[in-house]
Each structure stands twice: as structure tokens, then as C-alpha cells.
């Protein structure tokens, strides 16, 4: 029995060492789980923050670009409308000049008609 006791004691000692090692390993695994859960949450938060930041950047870029394009188009259209307005103003001036000429011609025509009427009357008076 004496030979069995030292072997049992050795086995018990090894069993205790294995239990301690198992408890340490389980503790380390639990620590790794907690750390990985924290890391997962942090990674998720970082991904959400990155997504929101990129979304804002893309939207801001699109809005900025559309504002720039709209402003450029507005300036170009204003310049073209300005040119068209100037042409219309020139045409209005020409029409005013033509109206004045026509008024002058109408006055001349009336005088010519009056002169012709006077000549016609004189010719009738001479024939009688």
C-alpha cells in the first residue's frame, strides 16, 4: 500500500495542477470573450461612424456640386438673357425710328395728297 499511496498522491497532485490550469484557462477564455465582445462593439460603432461620415461627405459633395453647377448655369443663362434683352432693346429702337420715319412719310403723303387735291381743284376750275 505504501507504493500505491505515493502514486495516488502524485496523481492527486497532477489532478490539482490540471484543475488549476483548467481554471486559469477558463478564466483566460472568459477574459478573451469579454475583450472580443468589447472589440466587436467598438468595431460596430466605428463602422457606423464611418458610414455616417461617408454618407455626410457624399451628400455634402453632391449638394455642393449641384449648387456650383446651378450657379454656373444661372450665370450663363443670365448672360444669354442679357444679350437677348440688348438685342430686343436695339430692335425696339429700330422700330421707334421706323415709326418716326413712317409718321414723317405719312405727313408727306398727306401734304402730297393735299397738293394733288389742290391741283385737281385748280384744273377743274380752269376747265370751267
Image: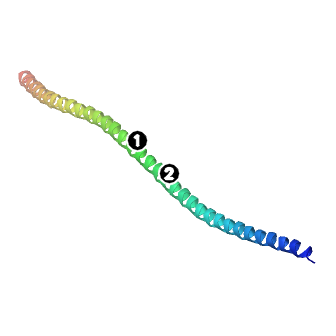
Q: Name the residue under label 2.
A: 54
Would you say 58 lies left or right of 91 here? right
At horizontal 23% and vertical 31% (from top left) the residue drawn is 90
Q: Residue furthest bottom?
A: 1
Count neighbours of disc 2 (C-alpha within 10 A) and say few if under 14, some if 14 to 19, many if 20 or more: few
Secondary structure of the residue carrying tag 1 is: helix
List x then y, in percent, for residue 63. 42, 49
Q: Mark 1 points at which residue?
A: 69
Q: Which residue lies furthest to the front in this view?
A: 2
Whether residue 17 is situated above or below residue 123 in the rendered picture: below
At horizontal 42% and vertical 45% (from top left) the residue drawn is 66
Quarter-of-image position of residue 69: top left
Secondary structure of the residue carrying tag 2 is: helix
Quarter-of-image position of residue 41: bottom right
* Residue nearer the viewer, 109 or 24: 24
Whether residue 98 is situated above or below residue 21 in the rendered picture: above
Count neighbours of disc 1 (C-alpha within 10 A) and say few if under 14, some if 14 to 19, many if 20 or more: few
Amino acid at each position: 500500500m505504501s507504493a500505491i499511496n505515493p502514486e495516488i498522491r502524485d496523481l492527486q497532485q497532477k489532478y490539482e495542477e490540471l484543475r488549476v490550469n483548467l481554471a486559469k484557462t477558463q478564466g483566460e477564455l472568459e477574459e478573451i470573450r469579454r475583450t472580443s465582445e468589447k472589440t466587436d462593439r467598438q468595431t460596430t460603432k466605428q463602422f457606423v461612424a464611418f458610414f455616417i461620415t461617408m454618407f455626410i461627405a457624399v451628400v455634402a459633395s453632391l449638394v455642393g456640386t449641384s449648387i456650383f453647377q446651378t450657379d454656373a448655369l444661372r450665370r450663363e443663362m443670365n448672360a444669354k438673357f442679357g444679350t437677348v434683352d440688348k438685342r430686343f432693346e436695339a430692335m425696339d429702337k429700330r422700330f421707334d425710328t421706323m415709326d418716326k420715319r413712317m409718321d414723317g412719310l405719312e405727313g408727306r403723303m398727306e401734304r402730297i395728297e393735299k397738293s394733288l387735291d389742290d391741283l385737281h381743284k385748280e384744273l377743274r376750275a380752269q376747265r370751267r
